[in-house]
Image (spheres, rainbow, N blue to C red):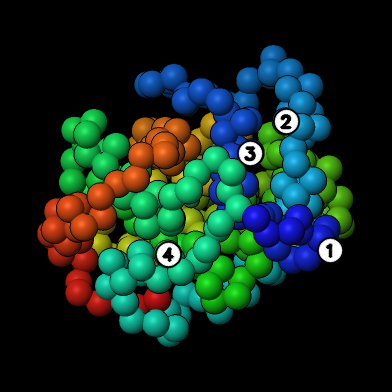
Amino acid sequence: MKPAASPTTNNPLQSLEEWEDFVKERYPEPAAANEPFKATDPDKKKEAFRNYEADARPTVREFYRMNHRHQTLEFVQAKKKEFLSFSRRKMSIWEAMEYLNTLVDDSDPDTDLSQLEHLLQAAEQIRKDGHPRWFILTGLIHDLGKILCLYGEPQWAVVGDTFPVGCAHSDTIVFPQFFADNPDSQNPRFQTKLGVYEEGCGLDNVHLSWGHDEYIYQVAKDYLPEEGLYMLRYHSFYPGHREGAYDFLMNDKDRKMFEWVRAFNPYDLYTKSHVKPDVAALKPFYDDLIAEFFPAQLNW
Ligand SMILES: [Fe+2]
C-alpha cells in the first residue's frame, strides 16, 4: 500500500480506479437497455447527488476539486495543441497496451488486475455477448488514452467525468460547487447556457474537458467505425450519456450515436472481476483483430 496522498498533490487518487469506483457508486446499476434519450429528469432528487459527494473519499473529492478548477476552455485548447500532434511515440496497439501496463496502480483495494488485464476483460465480455468485432476492439482500446499519465499528466487531466467547457456547467456534474474556483466561471461569455456554441451545433464542434477519451479517439479516428469512435470519445461524458444534460448542443447524429455510447457503458463500468484473463492464450485472437483495423504502427 502506498501512503495516503497528501491533499496538496497534483495526483490525489491512490489509483485511477478510485475515480471509476466512485462513478460506479454513483451509478450502481446499468442504464435500462433501450432507454430512450431524455433530457435531465426534473424530478430527480438533488440529495441523491449530495450523498455521493458526502460519501466520497477525501482523495476523490480532492481529485474533482482540481479537475473542476483547472479544466477551462483555454486549458483544453492548450492540451489539444500539446498532445494531438502525436509526436511522442510510435507504437502498435498492443505495444501501447504494454506501455499502459507500466502504470502501476497497486493500491486499488477492489482489484488486483493490471491495466492490460482490465482492457482484455472488457473486450472479452463484449465478445462473449456476441457483439461485432469492431465493438470488441473498441472495448480493448477504450482506456489506452490513460498513457497520458505516463507522459506526466496529472490525474485530473486524464480521467474524470467529462463535460463541455466554454458554456455554463450543468448541475448534473458531480461536485458542481467546485466550479466556483474555475476561472471560466468568472467569464460571463462562458456562463450562458450556450456559451461559445450554437444550439444544436453537434458535439464535434464542442470542446469537452480534456482527458483520456479525446486522446484515444484522435489516435483511432481513421480506423474504427463511427459507432466505436463515439464510444471512445464520450465514454466518460456521464453528464451527456447518463444524465441527459447538454442535449441542446447535440445534433440528431449525436443522439443516434449516443445509443452506442450507452450500449458500451456497462462494459466500461460493470465488467470488473478478479478473474484474470489468460493474456498469452488471448493474444493471437487480439493480434488478428487489431491487424484487421489498425496499421502496424500508430503515432501517439
Ligand atoms: Fe475510460
Tell me the element at label 2.
helix
Q: Nearer the viewer, residue 259 or 270?
A: 270
Which residue is painted at 48% across and 56% down in the image?
213
Specify the quadrant of the image occupied by residue 79.
bottom right
Q: Earlier in the sequence, mark 1 or mark 4?
A: 1
Q: CA distance from mark 2 to mark 4?
A: 30 Å
Specify the quadrant of the image occupied by residue 246.
top right
Amino acid type, residue under disc 3 in the picture: Phe
Please name which of the two marks, 1 or 4, marks the residue nearer to the observer. 4
Q: Nearer the viewer, residue 107 or 250?
A: 107
Q: In the rendered view, would you say 199 is above or below 244?
A: below
Amino acid type, residue under disc 4 in the picture: Asn
Residue that carries the numbered disc 4 in the rendered image: 101
Amino acid type, residue under disc 1 in the picture: Thr
Classify the position of the C terminus by image quarter: bottom left
Tell me the element at label 4.
loop
Q: CA distance from mark 3 to mark 1?
A: 20 Å
Amino acid type, residue under disc 2 in the picture: Tyr
Q: Is residue 97 left or right of residue 76?
A: left
Tell me the element at label 1.
loop
Q: Is residue 236 left or right of residue 253?
A: right
Which residue is painted at 41% across and 61% down in the image?
144
Identify the mark at residue 52; answer none if there is no mark: 2
Rendered location of residue 162, percent (x, y)? 59, 49
Mark 4 crowdedness (10 Å alpha carbons): few <14, some 14-19, many ≥20: some
Q: CA distance from mark 4 to mark 3?
A: 22 Å
Q: Nearer the viewer, residue 92 or 177?
A: 92
